Image (cartoon, rainbow, N blue to C red):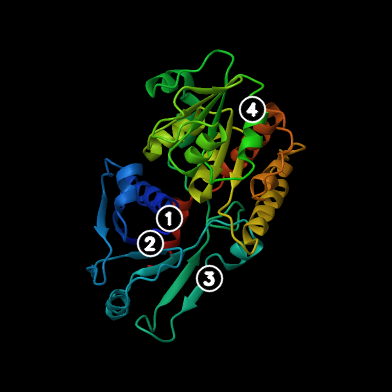
């Protein structure tokens, strides 16, 4: 089928990351995809080589409409241009119009998944826009998971890969990946790590600056490289394309991740992880976190070990107080892999989208 995917870049990597993974996955399954994005710069970082079958167009006020189009996806309610929507409404065979929502474990997501929104007025009058919610439960739209991803994960060997990016670890070092927003309690959290041999890998983003400040390093590019605090070694990383970022998460004994795309990749990585949501002043992010943790407890046969929920809460509280103790990694990893196994039995997001559209053509 022929797909147009509209994306507005709000926080630099998040929206672009989800949309690119979706487009690349659809194209790898034989779909023809155009990504219309208002800021192409993030793609030069996360997908510098592009992907076969994905045509990237800079979104402007009058994007070309294809009369043979099968599907239009507006990611996260970004609203395609009015003239484009009017062309959809005039088309002899209108494409299926989908609003791909943000990932959420809140109950309303499963209730609203797959519901139509008839357009009674405006340029799309007469069309229906369908709500599609990614999610963790059987009633939602699934998670992005490429065919063969978990087999690749199972065959992965971390030490050769770490050496390939210049981050060789010693035999007794645990690997911690920090891909977070800034947090006022970061200095206290680093102190919880430095007592044991730890290789801290910090990808590009706000966490690099925060760690530099927390460790008292000189503010310059690459200042983290080789810096140590007790038994903690911190290494700054350059931008990694998405497949390499996945392997970074696969390399870790503990991942701290931010946002939607990285949460899903941390789940598939199968290592202990903490999810830091984008902080919102009205506290909405804490309700989303609570729904996620409740979903994990309800859906998984491998419940969260003691202390994990408290650490999630600390990372999302934006307070400078000391963090709770780091839970034991072995049972924590068992809990992640237990839920991963159950999630892997559900149809993935791209498969569900393809089936959803085919049923409405």
Q: Which residue is mark 4?
A: 193
Can you name the residue that lies furthest to the bottom here? 121
Closer to the eye: label 3 or 4: 4
Q: CA distance from mark 1 to mark 2?
A: 7 Å
Above or below residue 272? Residue 232 is above
- Pointers 1 and 4 in contact (CB under 8 A)? no
- Cα distance, mark 4 to mark 2? 38 Å
Mark 2: which secondary structure?
loop
Q: Closer to us: mark 4 or mark 2?
A: 4
Q: CA distance from mark 1 to mark 4?
A: 31 Å
Sequence-first tag of 4 and 2:
2
Residue tagged by mark 2? 8
| Dot 1 and dot 2 residues touching (CB under 8 Å) | yes
Residue that badge 3 annotates: 115
Q: Please provide percent x and percent y for residue 271.
A: 59, 32
For the question of whether residue 157 can be seen, the reply is: no
Compared across the picture, whether 306 is left or right of 286 comes to: right
């Amino acid at each position: 089928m022929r797909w147009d995917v509209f994306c507005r870049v709000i926080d630099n990597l998040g929206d672009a990351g989800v949309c690119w993974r979706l487009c690349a996955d659809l194209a790898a399954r034989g779909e023809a995809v155009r990504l219309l994005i208002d800021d192409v710069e993030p793609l030069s970082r996360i997908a510098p080589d592009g992907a076969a079958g994905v045509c990237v167009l800079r979104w402007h006020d009058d994007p070309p409409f294809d009369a043979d189009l099968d599907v239009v996806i507006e990611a996260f309610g970004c609203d395609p241009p009015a003239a484009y929507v009017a062309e959809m409404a005039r088309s002899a065979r209108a494409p299926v119009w989908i609003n791909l929502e943000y990932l959420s474990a809140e109950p309303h997501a499963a209730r609203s998944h797959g519901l139509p929104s008839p357009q009674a007025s405006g340029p799309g009058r007469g069309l229906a826009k369908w709500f599609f919610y990614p999610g963790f439960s059987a009633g939602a739209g699934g998670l992005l998971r490429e065919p063969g991803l978990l087999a690749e994960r199972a065959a992965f060997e971390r030490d050769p890969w770490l050496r390939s990016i210049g981050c060789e670890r010693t035999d007794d070092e645990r690997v911690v990946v920090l891909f977070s927003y800034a947090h006022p309690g970061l200095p206290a959290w680093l102190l919880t790590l430095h007592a044991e041999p730890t290789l801290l890998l910090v990808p590009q983003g706000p966490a690099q600056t925060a760690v530099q400040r927390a460790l008292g390093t000189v503010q310059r590019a690459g200042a983290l490289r080789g810096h140590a605090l007790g038994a903690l070694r911190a290494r700054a990383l350059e931008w990694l394309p998405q497949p390499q970022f996945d392997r970074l998460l696969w390399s870790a004994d503990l991942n701290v991740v931010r946002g939607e795309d990285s949460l899903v990749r941390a789940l598939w990585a199968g290592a202990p992880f903490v999810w830091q949501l984008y902080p919102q002043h009205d506290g909405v992010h804490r309700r989303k976190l609570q729904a996620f943790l409740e979903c994990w407890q309800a859906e998984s046969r491998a419940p969260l070990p003691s202390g994990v929920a408290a650490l999630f809460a600390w990372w999302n509280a934006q307070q400078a107080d000391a963090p709770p103790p780091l839970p034991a990694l072995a049972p924590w990893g068992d809990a992640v892999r237990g839920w991963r196994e159950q999630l892997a039995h559900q149809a993935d997001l791209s498969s569900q989208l393809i089936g959803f559209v085919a049923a409405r053509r």
